[in-house]
Amino acid sequence: MAHLRIGSRGSQLALWQAHHISDLLRAQGHTVELEIIKTTGDKITDVALAKVGTKGMFTKEIEEALVEDRVDLAVHSLKDLPTELAADFEIAAITTRENPRDVFCSAKFANIEALPQRATVGTSSLRRQAQLKAIRPDLQIHPLRGNVDTRLRKLQSGDYDAIILAAAGLNRLGKTQLVRQVIPAEIMTPAAGQGALGIEIRNGDKATRTLLAFLDDAAARATTTCERALLNKLGGGCQVPIGAFAEVKGNRIRLNALVAHPDGTKVLRETREGDDPVRLGEEVGETLLRRGGDVILEEVYGEGFALPQQP
């Protein structure tokens, strides 16, 4: 049996995830200790994430702890992990996936369609903003930062008519009271890797990789590998308006993907099936670029858009 040191962010959700993995490891007979690490993304709380634009903003300091041998493994929300890991690291396991979809939360309204004209919706995700504006251009989208409790408190206090969050985080924390609608992926394509946990280790650490092998879920590995291959082809991080949702259908994978302009005026969707997760993701990414995704992303990376101000 081994003594394993886990690195994690200190948010409520990150700690739930780290303790979840700790419990599974302890059930295997290992001893576990947890090191809480503050990341760049945790320190910048007053700016919309899309405006920060730093790849690895929720992972860099944790990876430094891995390199310095202060921790043996890191537990991440997979959607926070850059699609191209530095050569020092590898993803040892991708856990069984929670619901990857987004949810509509509101104290007053049943779903997106029920919102009144010019209602205020909170999200700091350009991906969510773009898809909301595509179906409801009248909505007023305002940035929303903070942990899950902070976001829900802002909703309950009336700062927003509704907010959009990931189903996975609310399900894990048992905070689903204000969920009014699980938004179908055809309406709001989730972020690549949403709902899955990625367990990161030092590259070549065979002993730790072997200990973690039981955590790796084949379906989650295949679908998220496909989604991340698409994201990598498009050159995107978790803060750009790119969506990817893959499902295992028999022996094949079906990928629904999206590139959209933040204002919702241009929305490109592509659906395809294949056998090889990486090839499927890259082919769909290439198709989206050819169809005009390259122009949309150039505008986004060039900051040719304006995020609404905090209300």
Image (cartoon, rainbow, N blue to C red):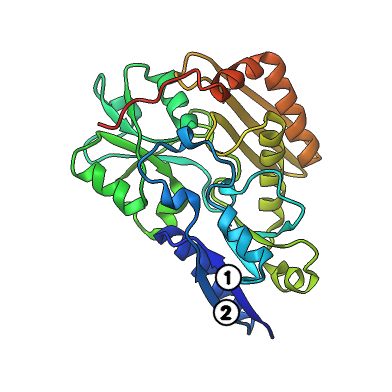
Q: Residue at x 65, y 39 (%)?
A: 246
Residue closer to the observer: 171 or 128: 128
Instruction: Give the residue displayed 71% in from the left and 49% down from the top.
Output: 85
Question: Most extreme residue toward the front, as rendered?
Answer: 68
Q: Residue tagged by mark 2? A: 32
- In the rendered image, residue 206, in percent from the top left (x then y), is placed at 80, 70
Q: Position of residue 278 (x, y in %)?
A: 78, 39
x, y percentage for residue 84?
71, 44
Q: Tell me whether circle 1 and circle 2 mark residues in contact (CB < 8 Å).
A: yes
The kind of secondary structure element at disc 1 is strand
| Nearer to me, 266 or 8 | 8
From the viewer's perspective, tell me whether residue 210 is left or right of residue 243: right
**Quadrant for the N terminus in the image:** bottom right
Q: Residue furthest left?
A: 157
Q: Nearer the viewer, residue 152 or 3?
A: 3
Q: Which numbered disc flags the more N-terminal residue, 1 or 2?
A: 1
| Residue 89 visible here | yes
Question: Which part of the image, by quadrant, shows the C terminus?
Answer: top left
What residue is at 64 percent from the left and 45 percent from the top? 82
- Circle 1 packing at 10 Å, graded few (<14), some (14-19), many (20+), is many
Residue 295 in which image quadrant: top right
Tell me: 220 left or right of 151: right
Q: Secondary structure at mark 2?
A: strand
Q: As drawn, is 23 to the left or to the right of 250? A: left
Residue where numbered disc 1 is placed: 6
* Kind of residue at badge 2: Val
As drawn, the label of residue 245 is none
- Badge 2 crowding class, 10 Å Cα cut-off, few under 14, some 14 to 19, many 20 or more, is some
* Amino acid beneath label 1: Ile
Q: Position of residue 153 (x, y in %)?
A: 25, 49
Q: CA distance from mark 1 to mark 2?
A: 7 Å
Q: Is residue 177 visible?
A: no
